[in-house]
Amino acid sequence: MSNFPAKPGAVKKDTQRVNRMIRVPEVRVVGVDGGQVGVLPTPEALRMAEDAGLDLVEISPNAEPPVCRIMDYGKYKYQLNKKAHEAKKKQTVIHIKEVKFRTRTEEHDFQFKLRNIRKFIEHGDKVKIAVYYRGREMAHPELGMAMLTKVTEAVKDIAVVEQPAKLEGKRLGMMVGPSSQK
């Protein structure tokens, strides 16, 4: 039999009710082989599970009456964890990196930052490119647009613009991501 929380009736939201935690008067029972046994009083269903050396697990608590299955609860939990782990392994996490420019960024700094952008995109990350304005530079937003255009042209072979350039306060920003063709 399985171990349960110390307090009777203390059930976490993500756990299922098992054996004596099932407190409804009757349940619909599914047998070990997956076949319908029928609607039985809960104590009788528990006795059937104990006789088989297994657990009575509530599968569908919202049904009327709740659906319970006779199975090995430890093995069931193990299989659920294994499926969740496999699903997590198949997920790809996309990070957003930010590279900051100024309207007067020198050529060497520009090339250095461009190499970083290319490295981030080749790794599969999205890159937020921002041009920051200070003081009177706000009078010439075309300088920032020219910088973003220069960056876009330099990475157009491996990246696509996902969000076009947009002025937000003292910052002109856009988002680029990896192109789907590799």
Image (cartoon, rainbow, N blue to C red):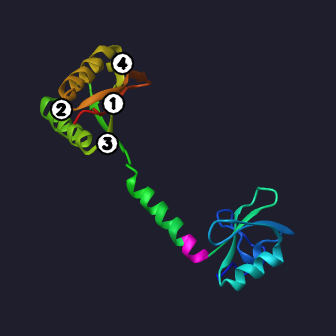
- Is 175 placed above or below 25 here? above
Q: Secondary structure at mark 3?
A: loop
Q: Which residue lies under the disc numbered 1?
A: 130
Q: Which residue lies under the disc numbered 3?
A: 125
Q: Which residue lies under the disc numbered 4?
A: 138
Q: Is residue 7 visible in this depiction of the protein?
A: no
Distance from the alpha carbon under mark 4 to that under mark 2: 20 Å
Answer whether labels 3 and 2 touch (C-beta < 8 Å). Answer: no
Dominant secondary-structure state across the stretch colored magenta? helix
Instruction: Name the residue type under label 2.
Output: Phe
Q: Residues within 10 Å of mark 4 (few under 14, many from 20)?
A: some
**Furthest-right residue in this view:** 25
Q: Secondary structure at mark 2?
A: helix
Q: Which residue lies under the disc numbered 2?
A: 110
Instruction: Name the residue type under label 3.
Output: Asp
Disc nearer the start of the sequence (2/1): 2
Instruction: Give the extent of the magenta segment.
Output: 72-77
Instruction: Name the residue type under label 1.
Output: Ala
